[in-house]
Image (cartoon, rainbow, N blue to C red):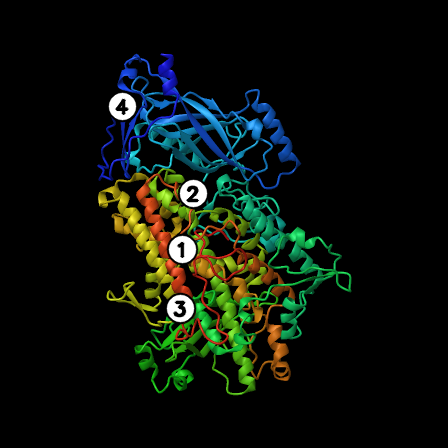
Amino acid sequence: MALVKEIMGCSITVKPLSPLKPTNHHNHNHNHNHNQLRVNTRTRVRVVKAAISEDIAKLVKPEKAVTFKVRAVLTVRNKHQEDFKDTLVKKIDAFADQIGRNVVLQLYSNDIDPKTRAPKKSKEAVLKDWKQKSNLKSEKVNYTSDILVDSDFGIPGAITITNKHQKEFYLESITIEGFACGPVYFLCNSWVQSTTDHPDPRIFFSNQPYLPDETPAGLKLLREKELKALRGDGKGVRKLSDRIYDYDVYNDLGNPDRGNDFIRPLLGGQKIPYPRRCRTGRLPSDTDILAESRVEKPFPLYVPRDEQFDESKQNTFSTSRLKAVLHNLLPSMVANISKKHDFKGFSQIEGLYSEGLPLKIGLQDDLLKKLRLPNLVTRLHESSQGGGLLKYDVPKILSKDRFSWLRDDEFARQALAGVNPVNIEKLKVFPPVSQLDPEIYGLQESALKEEHISRYLNGLTVQQAMEQNKLFIIDYHDIYLPFLDLINSLDGRKAYATRTIFYLNPSGTLKPIAIELSLPRALPSSQSKRVVSPPVDATSNWAWQLAKAHVCSNDAGVHQLANHWLRTHATMEPFILSAHRQLSAMHPIYKLLEPHMRYTLEINAIARQNLINADGVIEQCFTPGRYAMEISAAAYKSWHFDLEGLPADLIRRGMAVPDPSQKHGLKLLIDDYPYAADGLLIWEAIQKWVKTYVTRYYPDSSHVCNDRELQAWYTESINVGHEDVRHETWWPTMANPDDLTAILTTVIWLASAQHAALNFGQYPYGGYVPNRPPLMRRLIPDENDPEYTSFIEDPQKYFLSALPSMLQSTKYMAVVDTLSTHSPDEEYIGERQQTDTWTGDAEMVEAFYGFSTEIQRIEKEIERRNRDTGLKNRCGAGVLPYELLAPSSQPGVTCRGVPNSVSI
């Protein structure tokens, strides 16, 4: 018997894998004979045999299973920087580990024990080398444990970890070696809390994907238990160590306890519909029971523990970098710069990049190190006045042509290839027609007439130009007009609701030919609507430049509040919350979506705390001020998930027409539309990858309809996460593999490429404020206005006084620089952590490599397009290449790169 035990304790042999065979998705019958175990997987049929001959096996009494050892290797990630408390607790844990306060592991088999009718379990085992390796300073440390299992244990499908130490640790992965099936991988990427905080053992599943109905019998209860733990009970205040995903309304943006100026309406509900956000459970404020109490910086908001930023992201960008800007830099600016201080000339703006901004409050030499802003602050030194100089990087818009922002062709080019290329539409009706309720807002007849634009149409009538797809529009009339009375009553804010008409030149470039500026009828001594045309003299030139600046200010607000925040951050959060609540980690669709959900809940929480909150950066720096989030909520009313995919959006805006003969099934009206042309390449690659993946697990409609976790994910995303619009008929059905492919493609597109196109150009284009002012402070005077004289006498001074002040500009520049930055740990589209083991399905690993290869090919094609002199919207003298959808990037502000997820 000793001989038998010795042999059983040795390594186990593996029978070669049989060729790939089609599997019966409803067959769960397993042969539990301990000499031979067949495991039905989608990848291959494995035959597992114990490494003992039949002669030796006869020595073992059949009624008593023999145990043997397998080895677990746990990869734990160390912190890069430890404070005194961390070091002390680590030493205490190392000591306590020797006296039984250790880390305990237990394996669970895929099979049920026929005697107990419970899952087969190994003996409990402990990590045996924690103390010896506790002082290692390497980034990752591998700990080992020997686990005793019975010879008829079968295939391990889950493992539980009990952390009896005082300190949490980050578990990256577990590898089990010693089974005949070969190594078994568990991808964890999770914080394992101490039993002091969370008594229940943590459950991790192997990387083998299973649909709910195919879950091995031994894992079914664990699958349900883990999902129940993640959902929580909807009660109580969440601790930072919790892993509970739940929903709440946006009732945490205001701070009524600070006074009336900080009261903000609740977003979410029938009064003001809005998506739901992650619930924190904080107590209500003292003065308003419906408003959640605030947690102010630098204290963190709750997000589930595994959603918090990785330490490397914290150190380079995330909380450390963003909070450094908000806590240290911005107050310094407030203390040094008068709120009314205007730029004295364009050279003073450019001086922010060459000479720097003086800070005079006795800042120390080490402020640069304190701020951790290597890209924003390129030099900080003592000046002759005893303060310091803060220098900004030169934004990309100035890198090839300092004066390009003044040109009409560049103004128009940015509508196709700038940071907000998603609002331009084909002009379908002229004059444009408002959809606002006339009983509330009065008749909103456009002031645009044919005589305003006919001279720019190369001999065509307006109707002919529209029929030939020559006229386009960016229309912000209806989104801004309902708020203009409120906005224009704010101190230092003046805005119009704008419409801009463009003509398509034969060269494929656009030309702005008219700008309509609208005000509410009630505003005294002002025209309610006026049209500004391209200039014919010096005076009209400055009026035209002011009109373009107001358009850009409108555009900046819609870009930030509707297209960027709402459409890629806020509307995605419910899909992410529901995925964690309803899809098991072993669900194949969860494995597909996982990289596209990384960090989104954390960055959205930071936004609620610092950016979109009352008197936050968005309110301070953008035209709508305190009404910013109400404009975002107004935009939600016209949000349709079924139109968020790129092809559907292009067709909705009239920028493309369906055409089955074309590669992407549609034809662009403007061939040289860089955002759309590059975006369609990425969209098609995502769609092809998702279709391959979905088809692997869902061969027909019944598999989609009968997947209870999948249906629960989509249903809850709509009915709870988007509760206020749950009854809308535009929600796509999810009844077959094509439906599922379309839904998943849209989600992945929004989280990756769409967000990248809208985010990472913010500083490259907005870092020079005259190119893209986030707010305006003066209207355009006409001859009857008292300001007209000062405008005529010094139009440049008037123009600069209409732009944001120096304080507003420098604050805005600091923030958008931060928001445009890639961190070193960024994971780009076509990349995954643990590329070879993210799933146990070898065929899907191989398919993902194919997707990665296609992404690399797309990058080369984008580079080729940027060298094509025939594409004048991305190549030419002083013209910036379009790289916002180029997939890869270096860290920093690069104006390129498509991360997998909304992580900033």
Q: Height in image: 578 above or below 346?
A: above
Quarter residue 428 falls in? bottom left
Where is residue 276 drawn, in percent x and y? 44, 48
Mark 2 vs 1, N-terminal side: 1
C-alpha separation, residue under disc 1 versus residue under disc 3 = 24 Å
Q: Which residue is mark 1?
A: 750
Where is residue 853 drawn, in percent x and y? 36, 54
Q: Could you tell me if residue 783 is visible in this image?
A: yes
**Near-viewer residue (553 or 129):** 129
C-alpha separation, residue under disc 2 versus residue under disc 1 = 23 Å
**Near-viewer residue (550 or 272):** 550
Which amino acid, mark 3?
Arg
C-alpha separation, residue under disc 2 versus residue under disc 4 = 32 Å
C-alpha separation, residue under disc 1 versus residue under disc 4 = 46 Å
Mark 1 surroundings: few (<14), some (14-19) or many (≥20) residues within 10 A = many
Which amino acid, mark 2?
Gln
Q: Nearer the viewer, mark 1 or mark 3?
A: 3
Which amino acid, mark 4?
His
Name the residue: 59% across, 71% down: 803
Mark 3 surroundings: few (<14), some (14-19) or many (≥20) residues within 10 A = many
Q: Which mark is residue 32?
A: 4
Q: Which mark is residue 448?
A: none
Q: Are marks 3 and 4 in contact (CB under 8 Å)?
A: no
Element class at badge 2: loop
Q: Which residue is mark 3?
A: 865
Mark 2 vs 4, N-terminal side: 4
Q: Which residue is mark 2?
A: 834
